[in-house]
Image: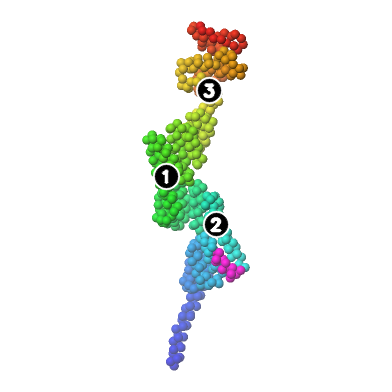
Amino acid sequence: MAATAECDVVMAGTEPELLEDEEAKREAESFKEQGNAYYAKKDYNEAYNYYTKAIDMCPKNASYYGNRAATLMMLGRFREALGDAQQSVRLDDSFVRGHLREGKCHLSLGNAMAACRSFQRALELDHKNAQAQQEFKNANAVMEYEKIAESDFEKRDFRKVVFCMDRALEFAPACHRFKILKAECLAMLGRYPEAQFVASDILRMDSTNADALYVRGLCLYYEDCIEKAVQFFVQALRMAPDHEKACVACRNAKALKAKKEDGNKAFKEGNYKLAYELYTEALGIDPNNIKTNAKLYCNRGTVNSKLRKLDDAIDDCTNAVKLDDTYIKAYLRRAQCYMDTEQYEEAVRDYEKVYQTEKTKEHKQLLKNAQLELKKSKRKDYYKILGVDKNASEDEIKKAYRKRALMHHPDRHSGASAEVQKEEEKKFKEVGEAFTILSDPKKKTRYDSGQDLDEEGMNMGDFDANNIFKAFFGGPGGFSFEASGPGNFFFQFG
């Protein structure tokens, strides 16, 4: 009786436990089936909820973790999915789908080597599994892209790095490391909006990501928003005090800001020599900061123009527009230097570029002035022929004519070679032509304004240099001359 009672007791205690266990399994299967239904309808959030309920009922069922891993992958939550996939293969190492999902999560997160191990295990269990074969190839391709990108980054071939990261991200869409490398290279290529978008997208998911903070600061730094850039670099260093790139960038940003401000201060104070030195020192800080360096070159060009080193000023402005071909201020500064050095064709080109970009009245007038000076420069320069300034007075023009006319008069060169005589006759005629124009207020005004002199009866082919000479030197106390033969003259004092 004692034995029977003991057995009954055991029986009485075991049957409810078995019943409860079976009931839990049936309920878990029901949850799983409902999860499958929602998964098929692509309602992954609901599918996740039901798979979770199934796991709660039977926490040692590998397939439930596998299903939930698949759902989390569809939701883009690869890190959580990896945890479920790993748990599924811990519970059942022969679970091929579990290994495939683990490998896929590793690959999506950018850990291609770990992904290869998972896909190899899946192939050990099922060597004909086509998905495992393809994913294994994908993982190896990602490792190859990583290797190439690392080498190209060292070579500063940033375009190729971006290409490699784009290919790698096709297989590893959740890899922050690949995204950061791509964003950094985009910043180095001057594609700041794209780089900012990538970094900001990461920061939305992880506001403490030091690499993303660094790249965000780098974009601002390269866009010459140095003060804001420093704030991001400092924040990145708070998250990761040993972040070497953020440390270097922060140091460069502060140094650039200080040197540029010191240069600006020296310029405003009229200390152009010191300003030149400071801008030059600033240009040596970071050759990668294109926009800031473009401004520094333009600033130094302005200093050189103040020092009347116009060729150096032109070179600085040229360096500025090479770095930033949209930099209007540099084009304007260079155009003015071209005007000052009478390089009018170059000035017109720069002003045309400016006016095409910013169609303002001021820029239109500057272009018009340059075009006028270019037109005038293609004519004979009567001021240069007489050797006088453009603001010369009437007396200065007369004195200049007297000197040049006597200097080039054919009689003075009658004993020279035929070639020299011909050249001096030409110059004599030009001197007379210049005097005719510049001594007549109406003609001088038209000439100075760039108008055609042949209009209104001012045809320059209709005058005689000898007659002008006679008119100027003839009369009491002056010079007169008579012809002793064709093209030969001699002076007589009145």
Whichever of callouts 3 and 1 sits on the residue coming sooner in the sequence is: 1
- Residue farthest along the left direction in this orientation: 269
Characterize the local packing of mark 3: few (<14), some (14-19) or many (20 or more) Cα atoms within 10 angstroms: some
Q: Amino acid at mark 3?
A: Asp
- The residue carrying mark 2 is 147
Mark 3 and mark 2: Cα distance apart in space: 66 Å
Q: Residue at x 48, y 15 (%)?
A: 398
68 or 419: which is nearer to us? 419
Q: Determine if residue 177 is in view.
A: yes
Q: Where is residue 29 shown, x and y percent of the image? A: 52, 73
In the image, 396: left or right of 140?
left
Compare residues 114 and 368 and report the one nearer the observer: 114
Direction bottom: furthest residue: 1
| Residue 381, numbered circle | 3
* Residue 401 placement, left or right of 251: right
Write down the region rendered in magenta. 115-127
Q: Residues within 10 Å of mark 1 (few under 14, many from 20)?
A: many
Residue 435 showing in the rendered view: no
Q: Secondary structure at mark 1?
A: helix
Disc 1 to disc 2, how far (Cα)?
34 Å
Looking at the picture, the colour scheme in use is rainbow
